[in-house]
Amino acid sequence: MKIHAATVVLLIWFCFPAAAQQTGAALYAQRCVQCHDSSNKDIRAPSRTVLKSKSFDEVLSAITTGTMASFAQGLTNDERTAIASLVTGKVAEAPHATADKSGQCAQNEAGFPQAIDGPQWNGWGADLNNSRFQLAAMAGIAPDQVSRLRLKWAFGFPLTTNANAQPTVVGGLLFVGGGDSKVRALDAKSGCTRWALPTEAAVRTAISFAPLDNDQFAIFFGDVRANVYAVNAMTGALIWKSKVDDHPAARVTGSPTVYSGVVYVGVSSIEEVTGSRPTYQCCTFRGSVVALKAETGAQIWKAYTIPEAPHPTKSNAIGTQLFGPAGASVWSAPTIDVQRKALYVATSNSYSDPATDTSDAILAFDLATGRMIWHQQATPMDSFVVACLGTDQTNCPEDRGPDHDFGQSPILVSLRNGQRELVIGQKSGVVHALDPDQEGKILWQTRIGKGGPLGGTEWGSAADQDRIYVANSDVRFLRDGTRRLDSNEGGGLFALDLATGKIAFQVAPVACGDRSQCSPALSAAITLIPGVVFSGGVSGYLRAYATDDARLLWEIDTARDYTTVNGVLAHGGAMDGPGPIVVNGMLYVNSGYSQWGGLPGNVLLAFEVGNP
C-alpha cells in the first residue's frame, strides 16, 4: 500500500461540516483532532505541522477537484475555504500568472532541439524492462566525471509542497508533471518552458513518449483521478483523455508503458484510506491493468488483479455493510516481456476480508488479451486499511496484515549466462527473484531491511546484467508522541548478485545528526549508470556511489532555496518517490516531499559536469 500523496485525505474525512454555520476551528476540534493531533506514530494522517507547510491552494484543490472531491459533495465554497485556511494558516493566493510566462523559451524555438533517436530517458524505468539502468552512450557521464556535477538550472513548481513526478527527456525536451495540476515541456539544457498544459488533477506519474501513426509525437501520463492522457509532445495540445476507472478512490500513480501502439497502465486507489471510516462500506475497489490504443485512447482490454468482483460479506460493529475481496492496486509502471509477449505488474495489499492470493504479488498478463497467465504471491493474508493503525479499528479486517505490498515495478533482467529473472524489492524488506519462464518460480529471496508500512524497499530499484541495486527505507519515528522522524533509524544501500541473491556490498545508513525533519531512510527510486549508482534520501541529500567498491563519489544537499528559471520561489527538501534521471551529460532530479514529516519542497534540479 502506497499512499504517499494522500496528504490531506484523513483531513477531508473528518473535517466536513455538519452545518454551514460551523467554523473551521469548531470542525477541527470535533472531527480532526482524532487523527491529526494523535501521538500515535503510526497514524498516517499528516500532522498539523505537515498540513501547515502546504499551500492554501494545495489543500483546497484536494477537496475541490482532487481525489477526495466526491466526498466533498454538498460542501460550499466557503466551507472548503474555511477548512483550507484553518489547517494551512493561509488564505487564497494570488494567481501565479507569471509562473508560466516567466522563463518561456524564445517564440522562434520549435520542434525538438535534438534528434529524437538520440540520448533519452523514456518513462519510469528508461526501458521496457524498467531496469532504471542508463547505458553509457545515453548517460553521457563517466564515473570519473560525477564528482564535478554542478547545478545548471532549477525550476520551481508553484502551489505545491511535493515534487514527486519524475521527468522524461527525449529529443532535448524535458516533460514533467506536477502537483499544481499541470504538465510542462521544458528545454532540457536551459530549463525554459516550451508549453504548459492544465490537467484535471495532479500528475504523479513519469511520462512516456512514443510516435503515433499520423506523424505526431505524443506523451502519455495519468493523474490522481484515474485519467490517462495523450498530448502532442511539441505543442502541448491534448490528443485524447480516457478515464480508466470510475471508482471514486481510483488513481493512476504508475507511469504508462507504451509498446507497439498500445498504452498499458496500472490502476491504484486510496480506498484503504477512505475505507477506514466506520460508516464506509469497505471495500469495493480492485486493481487493474488497462490497455488503450495509443492513437485514440480506446480501451482494448481491462484485466483486474482480483478476478472475483467484490460482494457483500458481513456487517461491521455499527451495522455498516462490508464488501470483499478488494485491493491489489497497481502502484507502479507495467513491465513488458517482448520475448514471451507478456506484461508484469506488482500489486498492493488486500483492503478487506477475504484476503486474495493476488495481493502482494507479481502478476503476469497476456499482452494481446489481458488474460492472467500466472501469479506469485510474496505475502499472504495481508488485508489492511489505515484504520488498523488508529484508535477506531471498526473497519480493520480480521485477517489484518503487515501492509507489505509492492510499490515498485518488477525488473526483467537477462543474466550473462542466459538466465532470465524478474527481480523486485518489497516493503517487507525482502528482495525477490522469480523465473518468468517458469510461471514465477522463486529463484531466491534476500532480506535487506526490517520492513514495515513505510519500510523495506519502496519506489524503485535498478539492475544491470550482474546485480540489482536496492535502497532501504525502514523510516522510523520518535517514540515521544510528536510523530517526528527519527534521525538515526532507517536507510542503507545494497547491491545483490543476480545469480545468487547474495549481498555484494552495502552502504551503511548516513545519520542526520541535529538536522530537523530528517531521516536516513532511502525511499526514493535509485538510478544506475555504468560504474555509478545514485540514491536520494529523505534527508534531502543526493549521493552517488561507485559500483565496484561502494565508495562515495559525490553528494549534494538539495534542501535549500533556489533561484529558478521560471521565477517561482522554490526550495528543496526530502527526496521520495521518483529518482534521478541521467541523459546526455546531465542529471535531473526532483526535491521536496512533505509527507510523513519530511521536508517540503517544490523544485526540479538540473546538473551538468563542470570543468576540472
Image (cartoon, grey):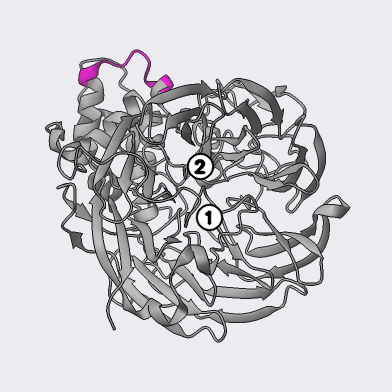
Q: Where 284 sits versus 218, above or below?
A: above
Camera-side residue: 280 or 113?
113
Query: Label 1: how many residues lie within 10 Å, few (<14), some (14-19) or many (20+)?
Result: many
Task: Give SS at disc 2.
Answer: strand
Residue type at mark 2 is Ser
What percent of the width, then of the height, locates residue 556? 32, 72
Q: Residue 269: which quarter of the image? A: top right
Query: Label 2: how many residues lie within 10 Å, few (<14), some (14-19) or many (20+)?
Result: many
Quarter holding the C terminus is: bottom left
Q: Residue at x 53, y 55 (%)?
A: 459
Magenta run includes residue 75: yes
Which comes sooner in the sequence, label 2 or label 1?
Answer: 2
Q: Residue furthest right?
A: 438
Q: Residue at x 46, y 68 (%)?
A: 535
What percent of the width, then of the height, locates residue 340? 81, 46
Task: Give SS at disc 1.
Answer: loop
The residue that label 1 is drawn on is 459
The part of the chain drawn in magenta is 70-78
Q: Which mark is residue 49?
A: none
Q: Where 461 sits versus 66, above or below?
A: below
Quick check: 336 left or right of 246? right
What percent of the width, then of the height, locates residue 494? 58, 74
Q: Where 74 sits versus 370, above or below?
A: above
Q: How far apart are the alpha carbons under marks 2 and 1? A: 18 Å
What percent of the width, then of the height, locates residue 251? 51, 32
Camera-side residue: 504 or 7?
504
Residue type at mark 1 is Trp
